[in-house]
Amino acid sequence: MVRMSVLLRTVASACAVLVAGQVAPVPADPSECATTAAERYGWGEPTRRSDFSDGLPADWHPYGPEPGHAKEGVRTPEAISVADGAATITATRDGTTGAMSWHPGQRFGRWEACVRSEAASGGLNALLLLWPVAEDFPVGGEIDWMEITSDDRRETSFFLHYGADNDQDHGSVRHDSTQWSAYALEWTPDKITAFVNGEEWYSNTDTGKFPPRPMNMTMQLDYFPPAGGPAAMHMDWAMQWALPESEPAELSLAPGDPATGQPDDFPDRAPRRLSPTGT
């Protein structure tokens, strides 16, 4: 069955007309998520956006190939695909899965993504997170603002990692993430807040636990053996907003470069200082 969003895109393209000798602009792709934090709280136009209408954008960087989480399984770019205006990460029972990061990052800001997670049968966790651009975890922190471990995808966890001992603050919400859902994060100097479909469900004002440096958004389907399978997670769009307090990352990846979660083993894939031309 053809997705409704595909039909709408086709109709929009067919309806472009000449106006004063120019082709009228085609409306933006319809969203799978009708209710967002950005709309509810008036966040305005994002600094960056991805809608995956033309494949995987060059500022999204697949991990690997490399060993997976805790050196289990394998992360491979082949597990990432784009079709019908959505990016998909698939995972198999043997731990063949994927992850991808969005560069450049920033310290403080807002992020929102429209995602859907297919039900799993153990050991395949769907995540949206902020990861330290400097690849200095755990002291660089980690913000897991959507971590779904339940097989039925009806409970979402939040984990704020901090400190040299990888201490963690945790929250959770009951929500059916097998349906398209808009997960958002707002990180200011004073507060970290998580939302789903515009509703706040986690907040933290203990600034001593906040990450000390810029972070970049990452989408992961992680393998925790033993696992059933297969499983998948999908992203219709992602947006990022800079705040007046935002600090842009000085390190990044060049367009199209592979990424890694294991810079000690793959230093050539770690973010670095780029030239003004982005190379």
Image: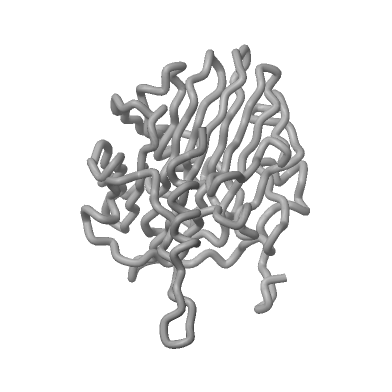
For residue 1, side relative to residue 156 (left or right): right
For residue 223, side relative to residue 16 (left or right): right
Rendering colour mode: one colour
Q: In the rendered image, is residue 162 in sight? A: no
5 up-or-down from 48: above or below: above
Q: What is the x, y in percent for residue 140? A: 51, 48
Q: What is the x, y in percent for residue 10? A: 50, 54
Q: Quadrant of residue 277?
A: bottom right
Determine the residue positioned at 73% across, 41% down: 64
Determine the residue positioned at 52% across, 45% down: 139
Determine the residue positioned at 39% across, 44% down: 32
Q: What is the x, y in percent for residue 262? A: 69, 41
Residue ranking furthest to the bottom: 20
Q: Quadrant of residue 181?
A: top left
Q: In the rendered image, is residue 197 in sight? A: yes
Q: What is the x, y in percent for residue 222? A: 58, 29
Question: As rendered, which of 178 and 209 lies closer to the eye?
Answer: 178
Quadrant the C terminus occupies: bottom right
81 up-or-down from 212: above or below: above
Determine the residue positioned at 56% across, 37% down: 220
Number of numbered tags placed on the structure image:
0
Q: In which quarter of the image is residue 82?
A: top right
